[in-house]
Image (cartoon, rainbow, N blue to C red):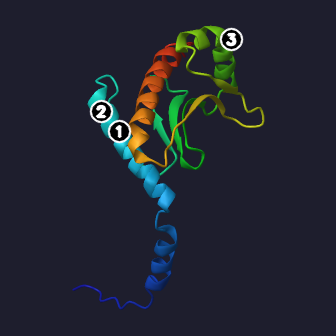
Amino acid sequence: MAPKFNMISHPNEWKRQIRSKSQATDPTSTQMKQLEFWQQFKEYANNKYQDLRINRKPSANHWFDLPIARADCHVSLTCLLSRSQVGCEIYIPDSKELFVAFSEHRDEITKNLGSNIKLDWLELPTKKASRIKATHDFDLANSETWDQAFEWLAVTYNSFKREFGSRCKQ
């Protein structure tokens, strides 16, 4: 013998459908272009650079985060289509002390990165995060010039990884 239960109330399917539709909006044309940019960058970097193996899946965001062998910061590559600009930055989410430690070696870091990389040191005093950033302008509206941007991103990322990854070890 077993009891027989009759359903009196059940989840409202209409509410569930509305909620899923509002959360799953279609990507914009800019987001689709960003996704295409990062997919092609990943393919470019993995084919051209043996030491730059990108395993993460590209997204439709304007940034693409990569590790640098540290847990307290990472490199964030950026693609700003509206400004026709790419960037490479050290993103320090929660350590003003690390930013200060890097800042104490600012001249040496700048020299080691080379004259073709101009750094902006952004402590962001009202925020928890800090950034050390380099940018470069490219004609991103023309996808035929993307290889030049990919090359700059890959070379700059490797330089940042080498310079910041081992400095001021935790």
Please tell me whether mark 3 or mark 1 is closer to you in this view: 1
Q: Check if mark 2's residue and mark 1's residue have beta carbons within 8 Å.
A: yes
Q: Position of residue 167 (x, y in %)?
A: 54, 13
Q: Residue at x 60, y 14 (%)?
A: 110
* Secondary structure found at label 3: loop
Q: How many residues crowd mark 3 within 10 Å: few (<14), some (14–19), many (20+)?
A: few
Residue, disc 2: 46
Question: Mark 1 falls on what kind of element?
Answer: helix
The mark tally for this picture is 3
For residue 168, above or below residue 130: above
Residue 66 appears in which quarter of the rendering? top left
Q: Nearer the viewer, residue 155 or 4?
A: 155
Residue matched to label 3: 104
Which quadrant of the structure image shows residue 105? top right
What is the CA distance from the residue labelled 2 to the residue labelled 1? 6 Å
Q: Which residue is mark 1?
A: 42
Q: Amino acid at mark 1?
A: Lys
Q: Position of residue 56 (x, y in %)?
A: 36, 40
Q: Nearer the viewer, residue 82 or 122?
A: 82
Q: Is residue 5 above or below residue 63?
A: below
From what the image shows, is residue 15 above or below residue 22?
Answer: below
Residue 56 visible in rendering: no
The residue under the point 46% across, 31% down is 153
What's the residue type where badge 3 is placed?
Glu
Left or right side of 64 for 50: left
SS type, badge 2: helix
Cα separation between marks 3 and 1 = 33 Å
Q: Residue furthest left?
A: 1
Determine crowd level at label 1: few under 14, some 14-19, many 20+ residues with C-alpha closer than 10 A.
many
- Residue 14 placed where, x, y %? 47, 85
Residue 79 location (% of width, % of height)? 51, 42
